[in-house]
């Protein structure tokens, strides 16, 4: 289950963020189901060979974002509720949209021009997906 | 006091020095064999060889188990074990002493017995005096190597002792009284011999006392 | 469970050419403490004081509830110590050493020892004399790891190891912590290893502790801010900015007290902030030590 967790110091982003992202990804694709227990902080730290404090921080942030829940003495699990995976994807989309807006501003495009571009791309790519 | 740990350390040093002990054993057998063989030349050769074995037995174990262990950085390994500095010192003293005394007793007892049985009983007091000299040198070397932590000082003390034997022997045997007593046919414990033996025993006791005292004052053990 | 495995309070030791002074250090139970310092800074001396092998001239040392150096024999039953300048007996085999250690410590885990022999790719019948430096280091670590001691004190455990061996060692160290009540203190030049597995990090330089915090705080508080400074604008000196280097119109500020307001302070005087960068532990260490040395000189 954890063989695909890879944390790299070369990544440039802090380790706790990498851990958070990999947890979110698994929840988003449904490999980790809502309510499913996840490794304890100590166990994940040992499996990844990172410090306990880093995993602790990742779990705290994930809990703050509502992705996981930690019960004292019982360990941690993916937050129950069917919409967790969806919420992550929604956040993902929002981030990309915001990036698109910044990129558009850099090019000097207006809001309407950006929307036109988006409609173009959606028509092209989504049509391919339904072929 | 963890006697079990001290015992383990002593056995460990015996094990590590097994080759040395084997060589000394062989040397001792050869020396005694020469004496037993009979004849003056073989006898003198055998006695000299026995003396050399006594000297080596007093040098090799301390140099290996104390000086080399520290030099090869294995002292840190030993001190990482659950022992106090005192237990380390005790283990070293017991290990080295037992290794030395085994060789010393075997050789000295055999030689003295052969002297007495062979009609040279007048030489026994001298024999005791001569045998105690390398033993005193041994305890001195153990003290110096443990306390000084210096290979240089250890070699210096060892060399000084070695060099002094011939000279001391020469001085002794020039005394007409000593020669007369030795060839007298009975064991004569003259005042000279007794006082020299007392000095040798004194060196042994003082070395042991100083070893434990000075080791206990150290604040940097490794 | 969350006690302190060991602590040093106000510890000092004087040598002829070097002094360790005012050392305060905690090893919290269940944590890994990384100890970084230049050569000769006092890491080895500090670790030996924790082992009771060096007697401190002042200050209090307590390890696993024992006062050091008096309690060293008892404390060492539960401490595993391995040092870069320590050697096993050249004439003996790894197997001899395994049996020797096993006969001394009750907590020896034979199965784990055999697993480690395989994992570290060692041959028990081989004499220590024939081993490479990396193999010797792994052999020493194996002897302490197989006991799963309550406290591991390691002086440069990964120095001289190839990347695969280092990875294996780090794996065993982090694995040790999954057992109750285990703690580790390790000193290292390898800031990457320290950054990866340490919970707490302590910097030492010239016999004094320079900084000591938990790792995430270190990484959060230190930043490098790249700023474009138009002509006529002067960047203000700010508390927490330990270094400010300006070359023409470009400046780099290194701070150890980063807060989100910092870029705004610069922008308020008319400068443009290009980027705010995180720093690696190595960069933090170098900056911290340089800052401390300047402070000492002033």
Image (cartoon, coloured by chain):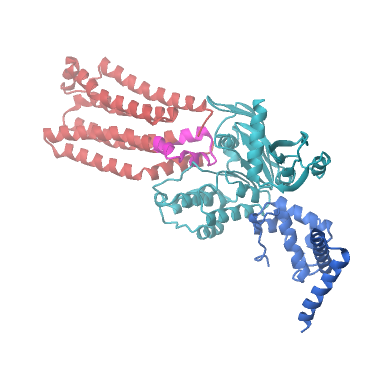
Chain colours: A blue, B red, C cyan
Q: Is residue B150 above or below residue C248?
A: above
Choose top left, top right, bottom left or bottom right for residue B158: top left
Inspect the magenta stretch and tell me whether residue B67 lies in it: yes
Label count reads 0
The one nearer the camera, B214 or B48, is B214
- Magenta stretch, main secondary structure, is helix
Q: Left or right? Give the position of A83 relative to C10.
A: right
The foreground one among C102 and C199 is C199
Magenta span = B65-91
On the image, the x and y values in percent for residue C172 come to 59, 54
Instruction: Where is residue C233? Give x, y as percent.
Output: 78, 37
The answer to whether any part of residue C61 appears in the image is no
Give the residue at x 82% y 70%. A117
Location of residue B172 by image quarter: top left
Look at the picture and state if C10 lies above or below C142.
Answer: above
Q: Is residue C281 above or below residue A69?
A: above
Q: Is residue C82 visible?
A: yes
Q: Residue at x 74, y 48 (%)?
A: C275
Q: Residue at x 68, y 56 (%)?
A: A45
Q: Residue at x 42, y 33 (%)?
A: B93
Q: Is residue C24 left or right of residue B68?
A: right
Residue closer to the observer: C153 or B129: C153
Most extreme residue toward the right is A112
């Amino acid at each position: 289950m954890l063989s695909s967790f890879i944390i790299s110091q070369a990544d440039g982003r802090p380790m706790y963020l990498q851990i958070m992202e990999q947890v979110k990804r698994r929840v988003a694709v449904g490999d980790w189901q809502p309510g499913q227990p996840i490794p304890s902080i100590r166990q994940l730290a040992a499996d990844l060979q990172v410090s306990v404090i880093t995993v602790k921080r990742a779990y705290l942030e994930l809990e703050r974002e509502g992705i996981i829940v930690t019960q004292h003495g019982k360990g941690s699990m993916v937050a129950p509720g069917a919409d967790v995976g969806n919420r992550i994807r929604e956040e993902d989309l929002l981030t990309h949209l915001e990036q698109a807006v910044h990129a558009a501003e850099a090019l000097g495009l207006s809001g309407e021009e950006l929307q036109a571009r988006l409609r173009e791309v959606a028509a092209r790519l989504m049509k391919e997906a339904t072929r | 006091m963890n006697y079990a740990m001290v015992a383990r350390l002593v056995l460990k040093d015996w094990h590590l020095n097994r080759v040395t002990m084997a060589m000394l054993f062989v040397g001792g057998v050869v020396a005694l064999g020469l004496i037993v063989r009979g004849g003056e030349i073989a006898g003198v050769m055998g006695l000299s060889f026995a003396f050399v074995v006594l000297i080596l037995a007093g040098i090799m174990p301390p140099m290996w188990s104390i000086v080399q262990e520290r030099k090869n950085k294995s002292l840190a390994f030993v001190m990482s074990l659950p022992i106090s500095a005192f237990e380390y010192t005790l283990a070293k003293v017991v290990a080295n002493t037992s290794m030395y005394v085994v060789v010393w007793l075997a050789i000295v007892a055999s030689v003295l017995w052969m002297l007495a049985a062979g009609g040279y009983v007048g030489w026994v007091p001298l024999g005791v005096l001569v045998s105690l000299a390398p033993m005193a040198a041994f305890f001195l070397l153990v003290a110096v190597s443990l306390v000084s932590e210096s290979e240089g000082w250890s070699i210096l003390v060892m060399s000084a002792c070695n060099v002094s034997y011939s000279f001391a022997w020469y001085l002794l045997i020039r005394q007409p009284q000593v020669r007369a007593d030795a060839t007298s046919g009975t064991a004569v414990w003259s005042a000279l011999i007794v006082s020299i033996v007392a000095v040798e025993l004194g060196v042994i006791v003082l070395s042991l006392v100083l070893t434990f005292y000075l080791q206990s004052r150290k604040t940097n053990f490794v | 469970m969350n006690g302190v495995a060991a602590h040093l309070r106000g510890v000092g030791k004087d040598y002829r050419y070097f002094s360790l002074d005012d050392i305060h250090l905690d090893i919290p139970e269940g944590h890994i403490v990384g100890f970084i310092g230049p050569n000769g800074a006092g890491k080895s001396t500090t670790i030996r004081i924790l082992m009771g092998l060096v007697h401190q001239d002042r200050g209090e040392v307590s390890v696993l509830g024992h006062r050091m150096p008096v309690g060293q024999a008892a404390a060492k039953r539960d401490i595993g110590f391995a040092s870069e300048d320590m050697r096993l007996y050249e004439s003996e085999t790894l197997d001899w050493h395994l049996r020797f250690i096993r006969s001394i410590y009750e907590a020896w885990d034979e199965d784990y020892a055999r697993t480690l022999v395989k994992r570290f790719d060692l041959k028990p019948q081989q004499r220590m004399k024939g081993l490479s430096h990396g193999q010797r280091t792994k052999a020493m670590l194996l002897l302490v790891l197989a006991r799963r001691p309550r406290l591991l004190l390691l002086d440069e455990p990964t120095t001289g190891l190839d990347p695969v061996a280092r990875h294996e060692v780090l794996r065993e160290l982090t694995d040790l912590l999954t057992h109750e009540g285990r703690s580790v203190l390790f000193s290292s030049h390898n800031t990457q290893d320290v950054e990866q597995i340490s919970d707490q990090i302590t910097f030492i330089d010239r016999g004094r502790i320079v900084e000591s915090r938990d790792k995430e705080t270190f990484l959060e508080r230190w930043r490098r801010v790249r700023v474009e400074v138009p002509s006529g604008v002067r960047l203000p000196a700010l508390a927490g900015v330990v270094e400010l280097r300006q070359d023409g119109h470009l400046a780099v500020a290194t701070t150890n007290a980063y807060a989100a307001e910092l870029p705004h302070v610069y922008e308020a005087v008319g400068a443009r902030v290009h980027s705010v960068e995180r720093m690696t532990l190595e960069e933090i260490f170098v900056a911290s030590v340089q800052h401390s040395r300047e402070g000492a000189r002033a």
